[in-house]
Image: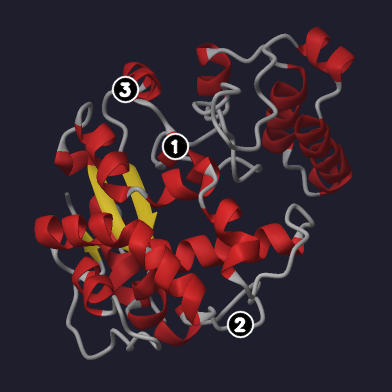
Amino acid sequence: MPPIKEVHYFDRSPKYPSPNGLQTASPFARFRKSEPFHRRQCRSILRSLPRCVLSRRFDRIRWGVRWVLGYYDDRWYKSLFLDVPSSSISGEITPAYALLDEEDIEWMRKINPSVKIILLVRNPIDRAWSALRFYKKIGRFNKKIECLNDVSIALTEEGITRRGDYPKIIGNYLNFFDSSQILICFYDSIEEKPVELLNGVCAFLGIPSVADNRERLSARYNVSPAREMPPEIRSHLERIYKPSIEDMAERYGGYFNAWRQNLGRERPASTRPFNFPATINP
């Protein structure tokens, strides 16, 4: 994987509601504009250089130079994976690719027709609530998140609703890639079936399993304090996402069925009693 987790290459257009420092291709124009998101990424890379020198990670240094000084085009994007050994599989993680319109998914296919796509989905109701809490944490939303009147507009922001529109997301990708190139994984199974989840990903990528220890895989990182969703906010989100949840349940079953069964419940039930697959191909 690249040193920077979220590359944001295919969603670089300003039409997308996503953080992106790659909108300006020319390095000279970038440094004149000094875009905040790109500036933070560059600072992070520069801070890591002394550590890379001490550990003789010259591949990381070359990568950092490409990132900071490169001209952002398709050749540059491919160069981000030049130092990957031929025996390895490379990729990147950018959740905002769920927002891509068909023209940019087609662009992705032109660059790499054989690419494999992994989509990790979460119940869109819980995902929207988590996004709202994150907005509150970083200061993007300054009202209380206890009353529907205070949050209803924020919950209908394009950046939240488009990421939870799984029928459209999956449909857009299936218009350009075969279903064998797409793997749907479930957030629920990170907790409930971590070994099965990772085994499914490894099998999809055609590599040996690395899921060797359930206890280690069950360790939690960057845990946010628990906060129950107010009932009126849950009801509001259910009205928004019920059609897409039912659509996904009818098409694919699995955890989508569990989400449908929890609609209308004040306290959603655990999905543990259900033997749902950790991953599926659409």
Image mark for residue 227: 2
Answer with mark 2 or mark 1, whichever residue precedes in sequence. 1
Q: CA distance from mark 2 to mark 1?
A: 27 Å
Q: Position of residue 276 (x, y in %)?
A: 19, 75
Can residue 132 be seen from the camera position used here? no
- Judge from the rendering whether residue 73 lies leftward or rightward of residue 197; answer left or right: right
Q: Position of residue 98 (x, y in %)?
A: 42, 41
Which residue lies under the disc numbered 1?
A: 99
Question: From what the image shows, is residue 86 above or below residue 222?
Answer: above
Image mark for residue 177: none
* Front disc: 2 or 1: 2
Q: CA distance from mark 2 to mark 3?
A: 40 Å
Instruction: Answer few, some or many: residues within 10 Å of disc 1's Cα (few below 14, many 20 plus, some between 14 and 19).
Output: many
* SS for callout 3: helix
- Judge from the rendering whether residue 236 lies leftward or rightward of residue 257; answer left or right: right
Which residue lies under the disc numbered 3?
A: 109
Q: CB atoms at circles 1 and 3 under 8 Å apart?
A: no
* SS for callout 1: helix
| Disc 2 residue type (three-letter) | Arg
- Residue visible at 65% across and 42% down in the picture: 4
Quarter occupied by residue 109: top left
Question: From what the image shows, is residue 3 above or below residue 186?
Answer: above
* SS for callout 2: loop
Q: Position of residue 95 (x, y in %)?
A: 49, 46
| Disc 3 residue type (three-letter) | Arg
Answer with mark 2 or mark 3, whichever residue precedes in sequence. 3
- Observer-nearest of 42 and 56: 42
- Residue visible at 47% across and 63% down in the picture: 127
Q: CB atoms at circles 2 and 1 under 8 Å apart?
A: no
